[in-house]
Amino acid sequence: MADVTTYRQAVAEGLAREMRRDPAVVCLGEDIGAAGGVFKTTAGLYEEFGPRRVWDTPISEQAIVGAAMGAAMTGMRPVAEIMFADFLACCWDYLANEIPKVRYMTGGQVTVPLVVRTANGGGLGFGAQHSQAAENWALTVPGLKIAAPATPADVTGMMAAAVRSDDPVVFFEHKALFAAKGPPAPPGHVVELGEAAVVREGDDVTLVALAATVPVALAAAERLAGEGIGCEVIDLRCLVPLDAMTVLGSLAKTSRLVTVEENPYQGGWGGTLVSIVADEGFGLLDAPVRRVAAACVPLPFADALEREVVPTADKVVTTVRDLSTY
């Protein structure tokens, strides 16, 4: 096994492992077959598994997710790709109004064990309709699990857990991380959904991040360490299930909290996490909670303007400096 792999390669590896393990797993989406996906996240799957298990579809998000829903209800475990997370809006009726409600409305007689994969977030200058971080859209819908890995090993391990879930999972793969490198997942690696990871320990401030904001938080923590401020960085990894206990455990040590999220401040996941902390851990806090989030504007095309909108290490450093002196 290679000592290092990329995030995009880890997506294909995670899918391949589950397809080898379970013949009920199939993949469908636009250009995922011979083309290997527009982001090359399905490279090699068509060659190994053929057209009966890797289905190229028309350009119709409704058709892709609708077919996946029907397949899942009849015993398969489909993995549907929606090319950009922004395009979830095109199949929102299925994703918000149909798929997450089937198990409940049938009294558990029918499950919908499917995964909807999608390329999420900004950082590549793709403009307002192809750069949104859309995890918070799915967060409003009861019945969906939400995964958003930050490292190659977590991509593969969380993909395994997502495919094996009997409930539908929306799996957000961050575009800005596709080229990121890290250790590959060991054989049989499974990361259970809903388990956050403490990726850096510290005693002064807790930084909670997700997907592409994890390296942002780590970069800020490294700089702040030079100023004598110890940041504990938590990678949430999932929004549903949400591992609030790991966050509260960290706050018992640090007493200060900053969330770092790419969702817009208005309706971002940080607001939900902060409300849980206020309800269940208010006595742990020695300072106000701060949220570093994207601005409530469409994502600009220009790189310099996009950086003004999304969280950056500079913004996190400034926020933590202010909070540490409270």
Image (spheres, rainbow, N blue to C red):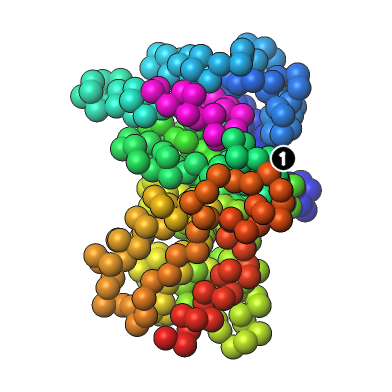
Residue 91 percent across, percent down from the top left = 46, 23
Q: Is residue 36 magenta?
A: no
Residue 46 percent across, percent down from the top left = 71, 20
Residue ranking furthest to the left: 107
Quadrant of residue 317 in the image?
A: bottom right
Q: Is residue 65 left or right of residue 227?
A: left
Q: Element under label 1?
A: helix
Quadrant of residue 144 in the image?
A: top left
Residue 277 percent across, percent down from the top left = 31, 66
Residue 163 percent across, percent down from the top left = 50, 32
Residue at the image point whose x is 69% and y is 15% from the top: 50
Residue at the image point whose x is 71% and y is 48% from the top: 302
**Vertical position of residue 154 compared to residue 257: above or below:** above
- What are the residue bounds of the magenta stretch? 75-94
Total number of numbered discs in the rendering: 1
Crowdedness of circle 1 by 10 Å Cα count: few (<14), some, many (20+)?
many
Q: Can residue 77 be seen from the camera position used here?
A: no
Q: Label 1 sits on what residue type?
A: Gln
Residue at the image point whose x is 42% and y is 40% from the top: 137
Residue ranking furthest to the right: 2
Which residue carries the number 1 mark?
9
Q: Is residue 156 left or right of residue 134?
A: right
Q: Relative to the observer, which residue lies in front, 156 or 280?
A: 280
Q: Can residue 246 be seen from the camera position used here?
A: yes
**Vertical position of residue 4 compared to residue 83: above or below:** below
Quadrant including the C terminus: bottom left
Residue at the image point whose x is 65% and y is 30% from the top: 16
